[in-house]
Image (cartoon, rainbow, N blue to C red):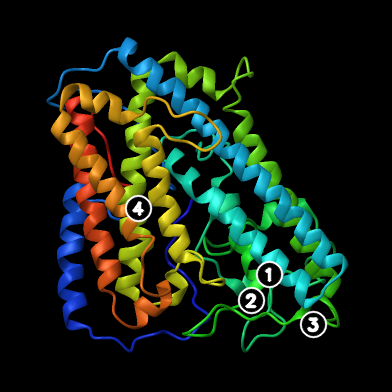
Amino acid sequence: MIDQRPKVSNRPKVSNRPEARSRAWLGAAVLACTALLGGACSSDDGGSADTSGPDDTSTGDELTAEEAEPVAAHYADGVYASYQASIASATELQAALAEFTENPTEESLRAAKDQWLTARDDYGPTEAFRFYDGPIDDPETGPEGQINAWPMDEAYVDYVEGDPDAGIINNPTDYPEITTEVLVESNEQGGETNISTGWHAIEFLLWGQDLSETGPGERPLTDYTTSPVAERRATYLNLLADLLVADLSAVAEQWNPEGADNYRAEFLADPVQAVSHMFRGIGALTVGELGGERIAVAIETVDQEDEHSCFSDNTNADVHNNALGVQWVYLGTYPGIEDGPGLDTLVEAVDPQLNTELTAQIDSTVTMTSEYPTTFDQMLSGDTTPLEDTVTALDTQGELIADAADQLGISVELGV
């Protein structure tokens, strides 16, 4: 599960911005969010899906299996290709972290950080494949919370300002050995912000706390050289990378076209339901997750820790890559494979004008999220207009996604 409240903050709050306009805007945004999500603007169920699919509350003609099959099949190919790309860059991150911890220098630390940013870019679009209880976030077996949970109470893992002995790393009494089993069992143990694994744990161990209003965290190299727990910290970091690659590989295998009895086979057995899942994934990411939990909440709290990637100040890229993933699914354009039929093909057949509007809106959102004037935390502490405009654009996009699904006889839930 991605979004969790309540949270523990170990950084100063940023509050030096005009309040009146933002509060008025936020009230309107909350009302819009409530209307779009049917009263749910928070992530309380870890992204559990409403899998009812087509029903008689929609107004369009019901989609047929023959129409849906090529779109669902191309999506399955695209999901597999996208996860393969994520695995490839995560494996390179694994190697960069091993090199850094074996030879800790400023150069190898910089290389490890750069590779984290690259790998993060490849993972971001795959979040459009969530929210329908697929392999990534199946309520029983999905590793999403182990891969990408946030916000993270840094003190659960390592030292923070004012508490040099905090965290698993500095506690050999309770954690005499740092093993994969320890990290997995500790994740979310005793509290939802007790995050011990995944992208953001790696990010924290590379950058450290972000205590700056103008830049990312600045973890000193000595944490991996002269620190009394340098070896434990290095072990922790490498195990996180190993676990990340293993988790991504397990998810990808469920989409493997060579698999005889995996999720892909189940997904394609009901093409109409598969298309319903596709709409659910991009709709929930657009409105409930990205527009709601990841941007609107940060504007409301004015807290840098509500940035998705707060330690590295990579949140702008996170937002953009999520928007890009929505575009991939809608247009059927995935990396590493030829373009094929997307949801746009189906919408074009029933309502060409709506397809034109939604395609243009998605393109506008992708462009908007690539052109922010400064970093996410700088916008939070200064002019939040670009972020507010993004939430408005995402709300509009969500309405159009719901309309498009409706034209195909599908009722889609946009909450998370």
Q: Residue at x 87, y 65 (%)?
A: 102
Q: Which residue is mark 2?
A: 208
Q: Earlier in the sequence, mark 4 or mark 1?
A: 1
Residues at discs 2 and 1 in contact (Cβ within 8 Å): yes
Q: Residue at x 36, y 68 (%)?
A: 372
Residue 74 in sight from this viewpoint: yes
What number is the disc on residue 318?
none
Please indicate whether residue 30 sits to the left or right of residue 300 in the image.
left
| Amino acid marked by disc 2 | Gly
| Amino acid marked by disc 4 | Val
| Amino acid marked by disc 3 | Thr
User: In this rendering, which labeled residue sits more in front, label 3 or label 4?
Assistant: 4
Residue 45 in sight from this viewpoint: no
Q: Residue at x 36, y 73 (%)?
A: 373
Q: Is residue 87 above or below residue 21?
A: above
What number is the disc on residue 222?
3
Q: Which residue is mark 4?
A: 366
Q: Residue at x 67, y 58 (%)?
A: 186
Within 10 Å of disc 1 (Cα), the crowding (few <14, some 14-19, many 20+) is many
User: In this rendering, which labeled residue sits more in front, label 2 or label 4?
Assistant: 4
Foreground: 50 or 211?
A: 211
Between the residue at mark 4 and the residue at mark 1, the CA separation in whole angstroms equals 30 Å
Residues at discs 4 and 1 in contact (Cβ within 8 Å): no
Residues at discs 2 and 4 in contact (Cβ within 8 Å): no
Measured as percent of width and height from the top left, residue 239 is found at 77, 55
Q: Secondary structure at mark 3?
A: helix
Q: Which residue is mark 1?
A: 205
